């Protein structure tokens, strides 16, 4: 089973709940611990959080970025993506209903054309892609 880091808008409670449901209900190996402390004031120390995030990305096979149209602008999730790409990790983007401009890929950005980045329709499809790569 592949281990993957998940990145999305932490300030939207439905996102962390979605990741917890996938981890708990489908037994996905999600390395992200932020999903258990995404509420306002739940993280004791942001410095420690970012050190933990870096380690969680490092031990993962890759990263799944999830975004919906109302999730922009993304902030920390883009830093997490940059960390993953900097470590040579695959990044799977799931962005249902997000319209991307032709050349710039706004609102994501041209980084999404990096050779380690692929787009998927759903999170389960992205996970299946990780599994195929790991096999």
Image (tube, rainbow, N blue to C red):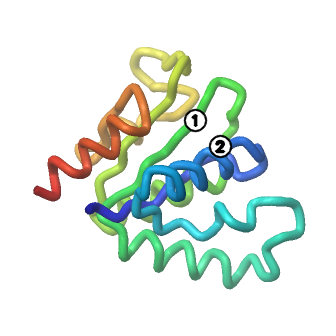
Q: Looking at the rendered structure, which numbered label has been put on residue 74?
A: 2
**Disc 2 packing (10 Å; few <14; some 14–19; many ≥20):** some
Considering every residue shown, the one lying at the far right of the view is 41
Considering every residue shown, the one lying at the far front of the view is 25
Front one among 17 and 49 = 17
Q: Position of residue 105 (x, y in %)?
A: 46, 25
Q: Quick check: 33 left or right of 4?
A: right
The residue that appears at 66% across and 77% down in the rendered structure is 49
**Disc 1 packing (10 Å; few <14; some 14–19; many ≥20):** many
Residue at the disc numbered 1: 67
Considering every residue shown, the one lying at the far left of the view is 135
The residue that appears at 35% across and 31% down in the rendered structure is 120
Q: Position of residue 104 (x, y in %)?
A: 45, 25
Looking at the image, residue 101 lies above or below residue 73: above
Q: Position of residue 18 (x, y in %)?
A: 61, 45
| Screen quadrant of the C terminus | bottom left
Front one among 23 and 58 = 23
Q: Secondary structure at mark 1?
A: loop
| Screen quadrant of the N terminus | bottom left
The residue that appears at 54% across and 52% down in the rendered structure is 7
Looking at the image, residue 68 lies above or below residue 61: above
Q: What is the CA distance from the residue labelled 1 to the residue labelled 2? A: 8 Å
Mark whose residue sits in front, 1 or 2: 1
Q: Position of residue 122 (x, y in %)?
A: 42, 31
Looking at the image, residue 49 lies above or below residue 114: below
Q: Quick check: 92 left or right of 21?
A: left
Q: Secondary structure at mark 2?
A: loop
Q: Quick check: 102 left or right of 8?
A: left
- Asked if disc 1 and disc 2 are in contact, CB closer than 8 Å, the reply is yes
The residue that appears at 24% across and 43% down in the rendered structure is 129
Quarter location, residue 93: top left
Looking at the image, residue 52 lies above or below residue 13: below
């Amino acid at each position: 089973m592949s281990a993957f880091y998940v990145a999305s808008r932490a300030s939207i409670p439905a996102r962390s709940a979605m990741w917890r449901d996938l981890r708990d209900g489908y037994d996905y190996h999600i390395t992200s611990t932020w999903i258990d402390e995404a509420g306002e004031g739940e993280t004791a120390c942001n410095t420690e959080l970012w050190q933990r995030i870096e380690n969680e990305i490092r031990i993962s096979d890759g990263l799944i970025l999830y975004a919906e149209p109302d999730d922009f602008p993304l902030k920390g999730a883009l830093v997490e993506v940059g960390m993953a790409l900097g470590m040579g990790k695959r990044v799977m983007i799931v962005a249902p209903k997000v319209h991307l401009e032709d050349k710039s890929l706004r609102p994501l950005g041209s980084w999404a054309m990096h050779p380690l980045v692929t787009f998927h329709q759903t999170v389960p499809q992205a996970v299946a892609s990780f599994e195929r790569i790991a096999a």
